[in-house]
Image (cartoon, rainbow, N blue to C red):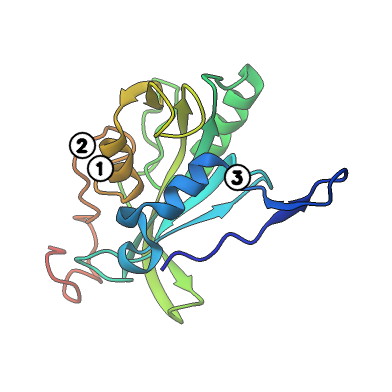
Amino acid sequence: MTRIFRQRITCPKCRHSFTVETNFSRWIRKNPLLDSTEVGTVGTDEDGETKRILWHRYKTEKYGREVQCMMILEIKENGSDLTPSQRDTLCINNQLIRNRRSTPNKKMKYQKGNTSLKVYSTLAEKDIYCRHFGHHVIRFSHTDPIDSKWIEWDHQKIDTNTLVKLLRFDLDPDNLQPLDIRNRHWKDISNKLPGME
C-alpha cells in the first residue's frame, strides 16, 4: 500500500496541523493503478513543495526489479507554464541526466543511443538496469486530473488514462507510444531475463 503522507505544517494563527501535499500528489496516492506496492512506483519530492517529483518505477511485471525507469516531473497548476529561465535550466539538466540523450541542437541529435545504465541498487543489493527519461512537464488547467478541464504532458493534450499509463511507464514519456524498456544492445543481461534478446 502507498505510504501515508507525513509532511505537515501548522497554521500560525489557529495551530491546526494539516498536510502540505498537493492535490496532484493526493490523486496519485489514492489511485489504485499507481499503488506503490502493487505497481512498483514511487514519487520523491524534489523541491519541498511536491511541485517537482522524481518519479521511479522500481519493478515491472516482466522484469521485476532488474530493469527500472525514472523521470522528473515538473508540475504546473492553474494553466501556468515554465518561465524562460526554468525552461533553460530544465533543458540543460535534461540533457545531463537522461539515458536517451537528445539535444535541441540539430547538428548533435543524440549523444548516446537508446540505452539504460547499469547502476547499483542499495535496496536490492546488486546491480540493476535503469533508464532515465529526463524532465517532463505536466500542466493542469486547475490543480489535478479531477478538477482540471485539460491536462498537458510536454504541451500535448492528454486525458487521465494516458497520464496513468505515462506514470506507470506503459507509454514512452517522450513520444506517448507503448514503451519497450528492453535495450537490444544489452549483451550481459539478454541471457538472464526473458525477452531481452
- Residue 50 bears which disc, if any? 3
Q: Earlier in the sequence, mark 1 or mark 3?
A: 3
Residue 116 is at least partly visible in this image: no
Q: Nearer the viewer, residue 118 or 41?
A: 41
Q: Nearer the viewer, mark 1 or mark 3?
A: 3
Residue type of the residue flagged with mark 1: Leu
Q: Locate residue 7 relative to residue 74 in the image: left or right.
A: right
SS for callout 3: loop
Question: What whole-number distance in Å separates the C-alpha atoms at marks 3 and 2?
Answer: 27 Å
Instruction: Mark 3 or mark 2: name the one nearer the start of the chain.
Output: 3
- Residue 40 appears anywhere in the view: yes
Identity, as a three-letter code, of the amino acid under mark 2: Gln
Q: Residues within 10 Å of mark 2 (few under 14, many from 20)?
A: few
Question: Tags 1 and 2 in contact by the CB under 8 Å rule?
Answer: yes
Picture quarter containing residue 124?
bottom left
- Residue 86 is drawn in which quadrant? top right
Q: Is residue 194 above or below residue 100?
A: below
Alpha carbon of mark 1 to alpha carbon of mark 2: how far?
Answer: 5 Å
Q: Which of the labelled discs sits on residue 171, or is there none?
A: 1
Secondary structure under tag 2 reads: loop
The residue that mark 2 highlights is 177
Name the residue type under label 3: Thr
Residue at the bottom extreme of this rendering: 125
Q: Determine crowd level at label 1: few under 14, some 14-19, many 20+ residues with C-alpha closer than 10 A.
A: some
The picture places residue 50, in percent across and down from the top left corner, at 60, 45
Mark 1 element type: loop
